[in-house]
Image (cartoon, grey):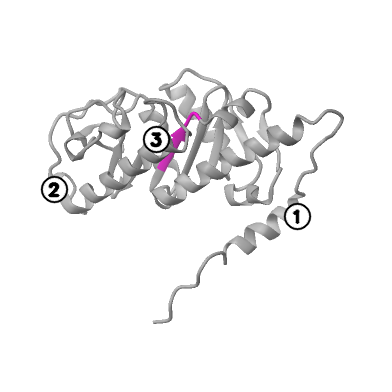
Amino acid sequence: MERADCAEPVDPAMNHEVDRGEILGAWRELTATARRTTAERLVVGTSGNVSVRVADTVLVTPSGVPYDRLGDEDLCAVDLEGRRTAGSLSPTSELPMHLAVYRHTGARAVVHTHAVHATAVSALVGELPAIHYMTAALGGPVRVAPYATYGTDELARHMLAALDGRNACLLQNHGTMAYGDDLAQAYERTAQLEWMCRVWLAASSVPGRTPSLIPDAELARVEEKLKGYGQAPPPE
């Protein structure tokens, strides 16, 4: 897949299903989420990337630009084939991974980080064991996609295989990939994954001790229970 360079300012007519206000609002939420990955130390510098889908338009962080410098004028958008639709900056080099997720899942947002503990785990095992019941929120024990050069279709293929039946995975010697129905959910799954990796590393580092794991049957119960988690919607 060729990497697309965005070349024009955002045009509300670029997608008949959305208007300029919706696109701009999504971009502002995206940049806020990208800054959060830096503030909460899930990435360093300009590593990692974030995207959100609005109809058939994908807004994505540009390559090599510090997140705290991103403004409305830096909006970068492509279609689902990676063709430029808006912006003057080149999209992230990891665009193939983001587009692969959107083409093969119902994702509306994707977060990719180089989180420290998750990256460490990705270099040690082929799967993050079920160290905590929140494993169920990610679809089960988190798989590690085999290493491939960043920004390549090969890495995107490995990632898709690791995501089968999951909403997050680890990338060997690289970092994390998670998606969701919106940016808040994608970010929450990323943060949970990093936290579970930290817990597993701490528990497995104790000499002579083997961490206990959550059985599959319990994960299934938790997965069902999580469907009712949070506040019920107000009555109509």
Q: Among all residues in the image, which is located at the extreme top?
A: 149
Q: Residue at x 52, y 46 (%)?
A: 189
Q: Amino acid at mark 3?
A: His
Q: Which residue is mark 3?
A: 98
**Would residue 28 be counted in the magenta stretch?**
no
The answer to whether residue 68 shows anywhere in this view is yes
Q: Quadrant of the N terminus?
A: top left
Say what secondary structure mark 3 lies in: helix
Q: Are marks 3 and 2 in contact (CB under 8 Å)?
A: no
Q: CA distance from mark 1 to mark 2?
A: 49 Å
Q: Which residue is mark 2?
A: 12
Say what secondary structure mark 1 lies in: helix
Other-residue count near label 3 (Cα within 10 Å), few / some / many at <14 / 14–19 / ≥20: many
Q: Quadrant of the C terminus?
A: bottom left
Q: Which residue is mark 1?
A: 217
Position of 175 with respect to 80 (left or right) is right
10 and 37: which one is in front?
37
Q: Residue at x 67, y 33 (%)?
A: 127
Q: Residue at x 55, y 21 (%)?
A: 147
Q: Among all residues in the image, which is located at the extreme right?
A: 208
